[in-house]
Image (cartoon, coloured by chain):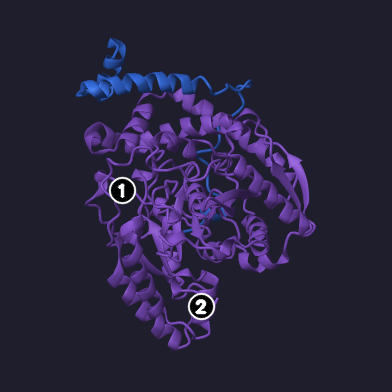
Chain colours: A blue, B purple
């Protein structure tokens, strides 16, 4: 595992990785990078993400 | 039908017999418990069987029915749920060593609605760990994997492995599963049953362990589309306990079934571009035959294309799944990852490494794909398309297993939220073939109507496995 990946893992709570886990994390880092590169970027800054948060409908919000 | 063993009755037929006083819920539950004893040592559809609880509920149902207090078509009908649905007082393990001691004090809304309707819980069904994996690595989980009743040397599909195996083998008359990227429809396809992923928000997820909040859908696995209609009518509907629950009217799905498909316009998706090369030619042939059956019943077939290749849907789904799933299991990953199976641990590492900008980009892509896919859906009454691209692979050929989970057209509708059902389209080498019917948002009635028309016109529902 590269030093920078090791430092990232430690910083975010993975301080006790075994050598096998370090190797797995390194492989997964390559996989995540490659997968993320397949996601196109929207041309417009106004293209919003699919909604994860939406206010309830007025009828539901008004319920006691 | 009169000679059909009780464990192979459909929900609809059993309900009719119970209503007529010709079938005792106690006898029906005993028949299923005997069936579980007889075949489950070979197929491992269950993690927990709640026999005493089921017998007590059956006696109550029998008393109520005798007193003329019938609750509806599911009164006295035995069912089971994937072991990620909570039932108060019954362990929920999700086939994970993280949860072996977990006994919830709440019951999932969908289960509660079924029990309120008089259905009788038989137990908790097998799954891949917390709904995760490809089926390639499962020998590191705490329970034996479920096996396909058509050939116990083969995969059930997943992650709702027990629901698929159980409904096919007759260890459950119907089951509830959950579907984040095909996990109801893929086991339904592999095991030759009907698996319905309803519209996002149609069925409450409250009390069911989350896998990926925005892609998780709960729904039924049944022997027929008619049975799915009966179950959906009970479990669908708004639930304030689920933030994604939709405030949408629940129709009488069964009332729409006899209408048939004459006059409908069915979009047929044949062209998947380069992704289509993975489709087993035997699945493709059965799919063409399915379209022809529906055309012969008066439907108009219209060739349509999805607005993007399957890989576009899969890539966005995978990134969203990594991000949300890691958020769900972060603490367990940091503190107890040694208890996780390999598949879950790998997914957690991907989520740990994922950048927020990439996650949000996937959600932006999702909106684009959902709207573009809905435009196609609006051009017809329902879509016909393959679901699983392969037949169930052999468990002793592990290199072929990931393809079953990865090569499919199921995750499209987890990303877009449209309803879709997997139906059996025949058999090859004694193994089920399958295809999907998908519909407009909240139009499960149309999806079930098309699926029912197809099932009525074909002999595939007359054949059962004997594991």
Q: Secondary structure at mark 1?
A: loop
Query: In the figure, B346 relative to B29: above or below?
Result: above
Question: Cα distance, mark 1 to mark 2?
Answer: 37 Å
Image position of B369 (left or right of B234): right
Residue B43, by quadrant, is bottom left
Tally of numbered tags: 2
Q: Earlier in the sequence, mark 1 or mark 2?
A: 2
Residue, x 42% and y 22% (percent of image)?
A31
Q: State the mark number for residue B3.
A: 2
Query: In the figure, B175 relative to B413: above or below?
Result: below
Tag 1 subunit: B
Mark 1 burial class by Cα count in 10 Å: few <14, some 14-19, many 20+: many
Contact (Cβ within 8 Å) of mark 1 with mark 2: no
Residue, x 78% and y 60% (percent of image)?
B262
Q: State the mark number for residue B304.
A: none
Query: In the figure, A30 relative to B102: above or below?
Result: above
Image position of B198 (left or right of B45): right
Q: Position of residue B414 (x, y in %)?
A: 54, 42
Q: Position of residue B20 (x, y in %)?
A: 53, 85
Image position of B256 (left or right of B151): right
Q: Position of residue B421 (x, y in %)?
A: 58, 52
Residue B241, by quadrant, is bottom left
Mark 2 burial class by Cα count in 10 Å: few <14, some 14-19, many 20+: few
Residue, x 77% and y 57% (percent of image)?
B296
Q: Residue furthest top?
A: A3
Q: Secondary structure at mark 2?
A: loop
Residue nearer the viewer, B39 or B46 = B39
Q: Is residue B229 visible?
A: no
Tag 2 subunit: B
- Quarter holding the C terminus of chain B is bottom left
Q: State the mark number for residue B95.
A: 1
């Amino acid at each position: 595992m590269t030093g920078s990946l090791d430092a990232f893992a430690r910083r975010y709570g993975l301080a006790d990785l075994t050598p096998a886990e370090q190797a797995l994390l390194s492989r997964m880092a390559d996989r995540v990078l490659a997968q993320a590169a397949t996601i196109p970027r929207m041309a417009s800054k106004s293209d919003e993400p699919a909604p994860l948060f939406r206010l309830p409908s007025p009828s539901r919000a008004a319920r006691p | 039908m009169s000679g059909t063993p009780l464990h192979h009755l459909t929900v609809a037929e059993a309900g009719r017999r119970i209503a007529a006083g010709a079938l005792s819920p106690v006898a029906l539950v005993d028949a299923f418990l005997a069936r579980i004893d007889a075949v489950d040592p070979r197929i491992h559809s269950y993690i927990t069987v709640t026999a005493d609880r089921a017998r007590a509920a059956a006696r109550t149902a029998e008393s109520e029915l005798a007193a003329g207090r019938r609750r509806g078509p599911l009164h006295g009908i035995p069912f089971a749920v994937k072991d990620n649905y909570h039932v108060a007082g019954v362990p929920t393990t999700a086939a994970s060593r993280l949860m072996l001691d977990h006994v919830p004090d709440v019951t999932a809304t969908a289960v509660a609605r079924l029990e309120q309707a008089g259905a009788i819980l038989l137990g908790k069904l097998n799954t891949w760990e917390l709904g995760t994996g490809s089926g390639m690595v499962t020998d590191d989980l705490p329970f034996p994997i479920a096996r396909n009743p058509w050939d116990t040397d083969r995969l059930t599909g997943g992650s709702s492995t027990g629901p698929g195996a159980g409904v096919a083998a007759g260890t459950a008359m119907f089951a509830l599963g959950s579907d984040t990227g095909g996990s109801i429809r893929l086991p339904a396809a592999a095991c030759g049953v009907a698996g319905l992923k309803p519209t996002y928000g149609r069925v409450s997820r409250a009390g069911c362990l989350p896998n990926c909040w925005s892609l998780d859908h709960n729904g039924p696995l049944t022997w027929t589309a008619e049975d799915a209609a009966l179950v959906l009518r009970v479990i669908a509907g708004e639930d304030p306990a689920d933030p994604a629950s939709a405030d949408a009217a629940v129709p009488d799905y069964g009332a729409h079934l006899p209408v048939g498909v004459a006059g409908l316009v069915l979009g047929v998706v044949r062209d998947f571009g380069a992704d289509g090369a993975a489709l087993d030619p035997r699945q493709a042939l059965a799919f063409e035959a399915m379209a022809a059956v529906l055309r012969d019943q008066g439907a108009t077939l219209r060739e349509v294309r999805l607005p993007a290749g399957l890989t576009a849907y899969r890539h966005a789904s995978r990134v969203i799944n990594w991000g949300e799933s890691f958020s769900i299991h972060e603490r367990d990953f940091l503190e107890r990852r040694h208890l996780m199976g390999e598949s879950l641990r790998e997914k957690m590492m991907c989520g740990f490494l994922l950048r927020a900008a990439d996650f949000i980009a996937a959600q932006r892509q999702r909106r684009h794909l959902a709207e573009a896919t809905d435009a196609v859906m609006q051009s017809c009454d329902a879509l016909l398309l393959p679901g699983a691209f392969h037949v169930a692979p052999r468990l002793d050929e592990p290199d072929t297993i990931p393809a079953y989970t990865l090569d499919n057209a199921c995750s499209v509708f987890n990303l877009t939220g449209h309803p879709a059902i997997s139906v059996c389209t025949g058999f090859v080498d004694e193994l089920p073939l399958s295809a999907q019917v998908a519909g407009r948002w909240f139009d499960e009635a149309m999806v079930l109507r098309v699926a029912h028309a197809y099932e009525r016109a074909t002999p595939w529902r007359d054949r059962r496995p004997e594991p």
